[in-house]
């Protein structure tokens, strides 16, 4: 007796699989050439409201990273986004910045960030490193980190050269 393939189930499975497809640019030379004006002391916490108190009330830089803490897997992570705490009107802290992302998770003010926060929900970690703004420019540190990692959800916070290359690559 022959069995026929279940095309509806196959199609649904492919859609689910495709939904989580993510393109990364990993450029070893960019990563190796990273030179920061300060040393960063990275910490991490799962992106969850109950973990807000673990985040420092200091200015700094942060990254959203996909990570799955399954003991059967080797340590790994995928950097999706890098930002910093410098506000347009008032200075912010890493803790305040993390809290702001919980609001962005609920409303699509920035569609790509909304997508990132919801698509990878449950697998996002908030990495953060304090930066004394008198010792280094937060904008400079953020741009250098973005140039080194080229995260897929970061848009503008690159050097002009990397932004141009990224835009050309994404247009193809």
Image: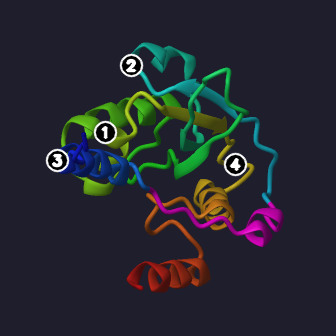
Separation of marks 1 and 4 at Cα, in angstroms: 35 Å
**Badge 3 is on which residue?**
8
Nearer the N terminus, badge 1 or badge 4?
1
Q: Position of residue 52 (x, y in %)?
A: 46, 19
* Quadrant of image for the N terminus: top left
Please name which of the two marks, 4 or 2, marks the residue nearer to the observer.
2
Residue drawn at (61%, 36%) of the image: 128
> Does residue 161 sit above or below 82 in this rendering?
below
Residue 118 disc label? 1
Q: Residues within 10 Å of mark 2 (few under 14, many from 20)?
A: few
Q: Real-space Cα distance between discs 3 and 1?
A: 26 Å
- Please give left or right for residue 49 compared with residue 62 in the image: left
Secondary structure of residue under mark 1: helix
Q: Does the segment drawn in magenta span residue 157?
A: no
Chain-order first, disc 3 or disc 1 = 3
Is residue 168 left or right of 68 when viewed as pictured?
left
Above or below: residue 124 compared with residue 7 = above
Looking at the rendered image, the disc whose residue lies closer to the viewer, 2 or 1, is 1
Residue named by callout 4 = 134
Q: Determine whether label 4 and label 2 are within 8 Å by CB.
A: no
Disc 3 to disc 2: CB gap under 8 Å: no
The residue wearing badge 2 is 49
* Residue drawn at x 56%, y 44% as measured from the top left: 63
Q: Which residues are magenta?
A: 22-35
Q: Are marks 2 and 1 in contact (CB under 8 Å)?
A: no
Question: Which badge, 3 or 4, comes first in the chain's sequence?
Answer: 3
């Amino acid at each position: 007796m022959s069995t026929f393939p279940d095309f509806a189930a196959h199609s649904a499975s492919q859609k689910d699989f495709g939904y989580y497809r993510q393109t990364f640019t990993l450029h070893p030379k960019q990563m190796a050439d990273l030179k920061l004006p300060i040393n960063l002391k990275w910490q991490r916490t799962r992106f969850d409201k109950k973990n807000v108190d673990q985040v420092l009330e200091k200015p700094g830089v942060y990254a959203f990273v996909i990570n799955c803490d399954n003991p059967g897997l080797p340590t790994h992570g995928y950097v999706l986004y890098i930002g910093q705490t410098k506000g347009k009107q008032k200075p912010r802290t890493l803790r305040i910045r993390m809290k702001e992302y919980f609001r962005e998770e609920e409303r699509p003010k920035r569609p790509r960030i909304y997508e990132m926060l919801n698509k990878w929900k449950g697998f996002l970690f908030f990495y953060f490193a304090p930066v004394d703004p008198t010792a280094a420019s937060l904008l400079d540190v953020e741009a250098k980190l973005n140039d080194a990692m080229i995260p897929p959800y970061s848009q503008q916070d690159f050097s002009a050269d990397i932004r141009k290359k990224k835009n050309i690559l994404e247009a193809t």
